[in-house]
Image (spheres, grey):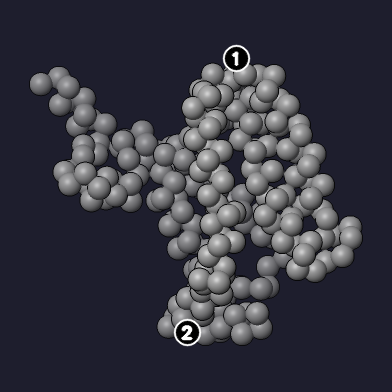
C-alpha cells in the first residue's frame, strides 16, 4: 500500500501502469478466482430469475414484493456494512461487509429506484440519468481519464491528499458534467462514441450514428 501510494503520487507513467497491473493481479489472481466467481455469478442467476418473473418490467403488479425486498435488503445491508466499524475491524468483518453487505444494498438500490421511477417527479430525474447509462462505457472511460489526470503524478498528483469532503464535491462536479454532456450528445447521436465503435466491431457493419441520419433513412 505504501508503495502504491508513493508511485501514484510521484512515479512515472510507466511505473504507474506497472503498479496498476500489480494491484489488479493481487485481487484477480487465480487463487482468488473462486471467491470472485462466487461473488459475481450469483448476480447473473438473480438477474435471470428477476427478468424471467418480469418484476422490473411490471413493477406496479409486483409492488408489494419489491417494497418488501427493498426494506429487508436496506436493513440487512446497512447492518452488515457497519459491522467492521461497530465490532472489530479485521479481514473477517471486512470480507463479510464486502461480499454480503454490498450485494444486499445493490438489491435495495435496484428495487428502490424501480419503485421511485413509477412516480412522475422521480421519473423526470431518472430520465436525465438514463442518458449517462446509455453511454456507460464512454462515461466510464471519461471518468478514468479525468480522475487519473487529477490524482496521478502525470497530472495534478493529488493521490492520497484529497479529503472525503473534497472528494465528494469533486464526485458531484464530475458526474454533473457527465450528465450534461451525455444529454447534449444523445440529442444528436444514437450511441456514445465508444458504444458506436463497440457495435461496429460486434456486428461487423457500420451503424447509423446520427439521429438525423436515421430519420433520413426512414424517409427514403
**Alpha-carbon span between mark 1 and mark 2:** 55 Å
Q: Is residue 193 visible?
A: no
**Which residue in the rendered view is the most extreme toward the top?**
61
Residue beneath the point at 48% across and 61% down = 144
The residue identified by callout 2 is 15
Where on the picture, by quarter, is residue 219?
Answer: top left
List x then y, in percent, for residue 97.
Answer: 74, 55
List x then y, in percent, for residue 176.
Answer: 55, 45
Closer to the camera in the image, 114 or 133: 114
Closer to the camera in the image, 14 or 54: 54
Where on the picture, by quarter, is residue 65?
Answer: top right
Say which element carries label 1.
loop
Residue beneath the point at 45% across and 37% down = 131
Label 1 neighbourhood size at 10 Å, few (<14), some (14-19), many (20+)?
A: few
Vertical side of 97 occupied by 125: above or below: above
Residue beneath the point at 79% across and 50% down = 80
Amino acid at each position: 500500500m505504501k508503495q502504491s501510494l508513493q508511485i501514484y503520487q510521484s512515479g512515472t507513467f510507466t511505473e504507474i501502469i506497472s503498479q496498476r497491473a500489480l494491484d489488479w493481479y493481487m485481487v484477480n489472481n487465480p487463487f482468488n478466482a473462486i471467491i470472485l466467481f462466487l461473488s459475481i455469478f450469483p448476480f447473473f442467476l438473480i438477474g435471470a430469475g428477476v427478468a424471467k418473473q418480469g418484476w422490473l418490467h411490471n413493477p406496479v403488479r409486483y409492488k408489494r414484493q419489491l417494497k418488501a425486498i427493498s426494506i429487508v435488503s436496506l436493513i440487512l445491508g446497512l447492518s452488515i456494512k457497519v459491522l467492521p466499524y461497530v465490532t472489530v475491524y479485521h479481514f473477517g468483518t471486512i470480507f463479510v461487509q464486502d461480499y454480503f453487505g454490498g450485494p444486499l444494498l445493490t438489491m435495495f438500490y435496484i428495487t428502490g429506484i424501480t419503485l421511485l421511477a413509477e412516480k412522475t417527479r422521480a421519473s423526470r430525474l431518472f430520465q436525465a440519468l438514463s442518458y449517462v447509462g446509455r453511454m456507460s462505457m464512454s462515461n466510464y472511460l471519461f471518468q478514468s481519464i479525468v480522475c487519473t489526470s487529477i490524482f496521478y503524478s502525470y497530472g495534478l498528483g493529488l493521490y492520497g491528499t484529497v479529503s472525503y469532503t473534497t472528494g465528494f464535491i469533486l464526485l458531484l462536479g464530475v458526474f454533473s458534467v457527465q450528465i450534461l454532456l451525455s444529454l447534449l450528445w444523445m440529442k444528436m447521436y444514437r450511441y456514445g462514441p465508444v458504444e458506436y465503435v463497440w457495435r461496429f466491431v460486434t456486428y461487423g457493419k457500420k451503424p447509423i450514428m446520427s439521429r438525423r441520419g436515421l430519420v433520413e433513412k426512414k424517409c427514403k
